[in-house]
Image: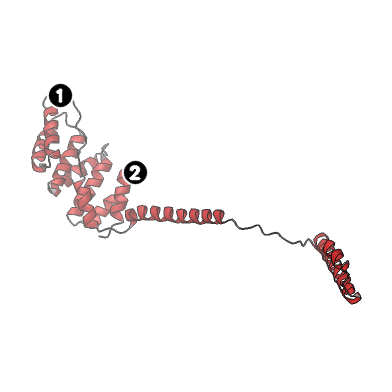
Amino acid sequence: MAITTAKLQDPNLSEKEQDEIIGAFIKQQEDQRLRKRWEEKLSQEYGISKKTTPPRRAGATIRKIGLALAAVAASLLLLFAILPQFSATDGQELLAAYVEEVKIDAVRDLATAGIDTLRRAFATEFTGQRFAAAATVGERLIALPAATDEDVLNLGEAYLRDQQFSRADNLFQQLIDQNSAYLTEARFNLALSLLSQQKTTEGLAELQKISAADGNRMYRAAQELLAADW
């Protein structure tokens, strides 16, 4: 309004120019009033109003992209960490790895003279990977009245590591038939022995009998062998 008044006070303006300035000003005012009236009418009667678009913040956008990339990276890391456990593996390679991992548990100290010495000797030979010598000691051990199912299992594992498969099978099957406290370990080792003898069907059948209730470690190992490529 101040600019328009200043223009009109210019003594050099002609009457026509003054009319044009006044007309332009009036038209501008009318347009603004008309626009405002229609905006109010549309808002009140039809719920239509102009939406103000907030300015995009570059920092927020970068943070969102960073979070998205981090999520993708985490997913890929998890995927590559889990997939090797469930992908098809060569059965023979997996079998060899598990047979190599067969170890006896720590030998318990018993008061009975002689059996304690034999258990220590057995453990020394087995951990030194002298499996034939360990089996010889184990045979003497299980002949004693105080021998336990754990001693039988350990001897079977020595046979397995020494590739005396038929002897190993007999001891493992004996523990299974007796429903021993070491039944799951015996069944798993029996499966390893059968698979080592190329008796794939029989070995896999034993692994299928191992359930999650038998312990997570044994169950996961059995499932890994069952999923392998034989």
Disc 1 marks a residue whose amino acid type is Thr
What mark, if any, has residue 112 been given in the picture?
1
Residue with the most extreme front position: 12
Quadrant for the C terminus, please: bottom left
Instruction: Report how far apart the C-alphas of labels 2 and 1 lie in the structure.
Output: 34 Å
SS at badge 2: helix
Which residue corresponds to the image point at 22% horizontal and 55% vertical from the top-left?
A: 93
Q: In which quarter of the image is residue 138?
A: top left
Which residue corresponds to the image point at 14% horizontal and 44% vertical from the top-left?
A: 159
Mark 1 packing: few (<14 Cα in 10 Å), some, or many (20+)? few
**How are the residues colored?**
secondary structure
SS at badge 1: loop
Q: Where is residue 182 in the image (x, y as percent from the top left)?
A: 25, 38
Q: Where is residue 47 in the image (x, y as percent from the top left)?
A: 78, 60
Residue with the most extreme bottom position: 16
Q: Mark 2 points at which residue?
A: 216
Q: In this view, does 86 lie to the left or right of 3?
A: left
